[in-house]
Amino acid sequence: MTLVQSLKEEREVTAGRPSAIEVALGDGNTVRIRAAAAPGTAVTTDRRRWDTFVRGVRAGEFDHFSVRT
């Protein structure tokens, strides 16, 4: 399951759940996103931007990325 699919279905994405993508909410305001296949590489953002992204996913703003041709 992709990150967008998990968020769209309102599933919690955490480091403890088996997934190709892991999201860790750190202390304070930091959110780290990484692919399980590349554990040494991560994208970081702040909680406000992450929450805005999640709302956009759930509103369908990224559905066009899921369309298979």
Image (spheres, grey):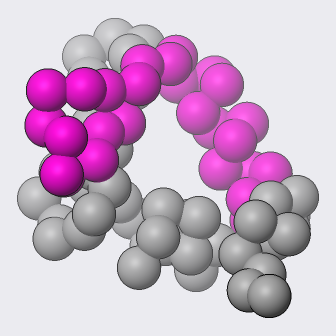
Q: Is residue 60 magenta?
A: no
Drawn side of residue 62 relative to residue 37, left or right: right
Farthest front residue? 69
With respect to residue 16, does 68 lie above or below?
Answer: below
Left or right of 65? Residue 28 is: left
Q: Residue at x 18, y 52 (%)?
A: 36
The answer to whether 56 is drawn above or below residue 11 in the figure is above
Residue found 14% across the figure and 26% down from its top: 40
Residue 49 figure quarter: top right
Residue 32 seen in the current view: no
Rendered location of residue 47, percent (x, y): 53, 24
In the displayed orientation, state which residue is furthest to the bottom.
69
Rendered residue at 30%/39% (across/down): 34
In which quarter of the view is residue 32 placed?
top left
Residue 26, x across and y down, in percent: 26, 23
Count of labels in the image: 0
Q: Residue at x 17, y 67 (%)?
A: 17
Location of residue 20 (image quadrant) = bottom left
Does residue 36 sit above or below 43 in this rendering? below
From the viewer's perspective, is 10 left or right of 43? right
- Say whether residue 55 is visible: yes
What segment carries the magenta color? Answer: 32-58
